[in-house]
Amino acid sequence: MDKLAKQLRADAECIDVAVSDELEQRILASLHGVSPRAETSLDTPARLGQRSARFWWTSSLTGIAAAALIIVIINSQSQQPGIVVPGDMPTMSHVALVDNMPVIDWKTETAMLTSPLREELEKLQSDIKKAEKKVKQDIGL
Amino acid sequence: MTEELQLIDAAKAGSAKAFADLVLRYQDRLLRFLLTRCASYADAEDALQDTLINAYRYLHSYDPRWRFSTWLYRIAIRNAQKIRSQNVIELDDLSDAESDPLQQCIAASETENLWLCARRLLNDDVFAAMWLRYTEDMSVNDISKALDRSVSWTKVNLLRARRALDADMNSNKQENEAYG
């Protein structure tokens, strides 16, 4: 035992404490007034572990049973006549969808977009012709 | 089967006398320990009484793989905490000898009692770990069970507490030497 341990032990013994007779009587009296709890009500870790395992199994089985019940109900409903299931629903063909779509006149749109430029080009060409004429007159051709 | 286990079995069967014989060996040690954790002597006595009553009441849940003292100390620690939380008095506030029950029970001497020093330097759980280790000779495993802490926490804090106490002892020694 090292020095610190010896000192700690010695100092603990220096703490002068003893249970008084009065306190001892009080404790004994209260012990007689108390009865140990029945073993059925105990919450030992082992019992808590058993309980949690039981709880886990119960909840798992309940979940499986509920899932099975839902599957059975869905299956029984799908076999009843008069109920439309998704597979029997009429579907619209791809071609019909395309046919019903509004057609855009792409040529018109192009003409609308390019007409101002064309007009400008024509003006420029006439200006060039006028300029050529004037130059020829000046030269005397 | 040891005598202690025989007494435990008898107490489990409902013999209050067997239980009284059993706790007779621990009551002084428990009271001394509780005194370090309670705000007054009366509180320590109340905590002891509650501890022994609870131990008797829940004796059926005692696992013989544990040391009986470990189990008792665990209950004692909880009861002391409960009483302290009711009183809302911190042990740090007990700086004067008149109100501190532990100081009242220690005879005046030239050097400071190491347990007073330990209580000043360490927090409650570390102090309890040191107490159980050096006054009850409990193993680290038993201490960790009693305090509901991990084994590694117990090991590390015991080591730190030892260092802190060693350092304090050495500084006090140097001061005493300096003053002659």
Image (cartoon, coloured by chain):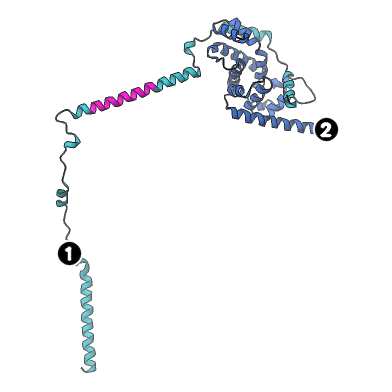
Chain colours: A cyan, B blue
Q: Is residue A26 visible?
A: no
Vertical arrangement, residue B67 with respect to residue A119, above or below: above
Quarter occupied by the N terminus of chain A: top right
Q: Name the dominant secondary structure of the magenta segment.
A: helix
Amino acid under disc 1: Lys
Q: Who's the residue at 22% across and 66% down the image? A: A113
Badge number at residue B177: 2
Q: Is residue A67 visible?
A: yes
Crowding around mark 2 (Cα neighbors within 10 Å: few <14, some 14 to 19, many 20+) is: few
Is B126 inside the magenta-drawn segment? no
Query: From this viewpoint, which residue is outermost toward the front?
Result: B1
Vertical arrangement, residue B95 with respect to residue A137, above or below: above
Q: Who's the residue at 53% across and 12% down the image? A: B60
Residue interval drawn in magenta: A57-74
Is A60 inside the magenta-drawn segment? yes
Amino acid under disc 2: Glu
Q: Choose between A131 and A94: the one closer to the eye.
A: A94
